Amino acid sequence: MPKPMLPVGGRPILWHIMKLYGAQCHTDFVLALGWLGEEIRKFMENLEAPDDVWRVTCLDTGVDALTGTRVHRASRHLDGGTIMVTYGDCVGDIDIDALLRYHRQQGRLATVTAVHPPGRFGELKVDDAGRVTEFVEKPQTSAGTISGGFMVFERDAIDRYIPADRDVMLEREPMSALVADGQLSGYLHEGFWQPMDTPREHELLNDLWESGKAPWKVWT
């Protein structure tokens, strides 16, 4: 199955991401389908209407298309102006409205959410005698940030920085050019954020959900 359809608490992680947006009154979605996209389309066609009613367009953007190309093609199916973009495999207690306000206050063409990457391994502190003085399982990295995947683009950023005639990775040429032109802002998110890149991380998200302690569940 496509990665966005992997279940967390019995629902695809894609559903959780859309609930996060929908609970904050952002309900107009274009899903950029690729490999096994029909599985996502079928799920959406059979989905019971959520409390925050969604308008969903399932768009085939190509099996092998890169992320920048998918964003460019998907953007053609949304009204002009500000567009929010995210991946289909990470969740967090992101305040979408605060992200959007920050983007507008900065006045640049694009904004990425900067997060501290969660630690994948236990961290040991060892003294000079070789004695372990501290062990922290799965610590969160305190220094350095990465893109958390929750992004905001003005339509002009997509038109100017993502070519329509070439297949490009969003994270490479377009982002590098935005940085070079001083048009990329970074919104620092200090709260919970977790990708689902490994089976262990998939299990972690399911455990959080089943325990009733899923920080990304901002809806009632």
Image (cartoon, rainbow, N blue to C red):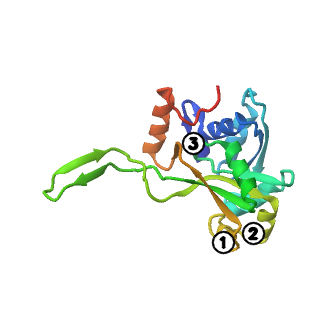
Amino acid carrying label 3: it is Gly
Which residue is denoted by mark 1 in the rendering?
Answer: 173
Left or right side of 80 for 52 = left
Q: CA distance from mark 3 to mark 2?
A: 27 Å
- Front residue of 139 and 54: 139
Badge 3 local density, few (<14 within 10 Å), some, or many (20+)?
Answer: many
Q: Residue furthest right?
A: 79
Residue at image position (61%, 44%) is 4
Amino acid carrying label 2: it is Tyr
Badge 1 local density, few (<14 within 10 Å), some, or many (20+)?
Answer: some
Amino acid carrying label 1: it is Glu
Q: Earlier in the sequence, mark 1 or mark 3?
A: 3
Mark in front: 1 vs 3? 3
Which residue is denoted by mark 2 in the rendering?
Answer: 161
- Front residue of 69 and 136: 136
Q: Earlier in the sequence, mark 3 or mark 2?
A: 3
Which residue is denoted by mark 3 in the rendering?
Answer: 92
Q: CA distance from mark 1 to mark 2?
A: 8 Å
- Front residue of 94 and 54: 94
Quadrant of the snapshot with the C terminus? top right
Q: Residue furthest left?
A: 129
Q: From the viewer's perspective, is residue 26 above or below residue 86?
A: above
- Front residue of 61 and 160: 160
Could you tell me residue 15's position as x and y percent?
Answer: 65, 37
Residue at image position (78%, 54%) is 74
Question: Are the two marked residues, 1 and 2, in contact with CB atoms closer than 8 angstroms?
Answer: yes
Question: Are the two marked residues, 1 and 3, in contact with CB atoms closer than 8 angstroms?
Answer: no
Residue at image position (58%, 47%) is 89
Could you tell me residue 35's position as x and y percent?
Answer: 65, 52
Q: Quadrant of residue 183?
A: bottom right
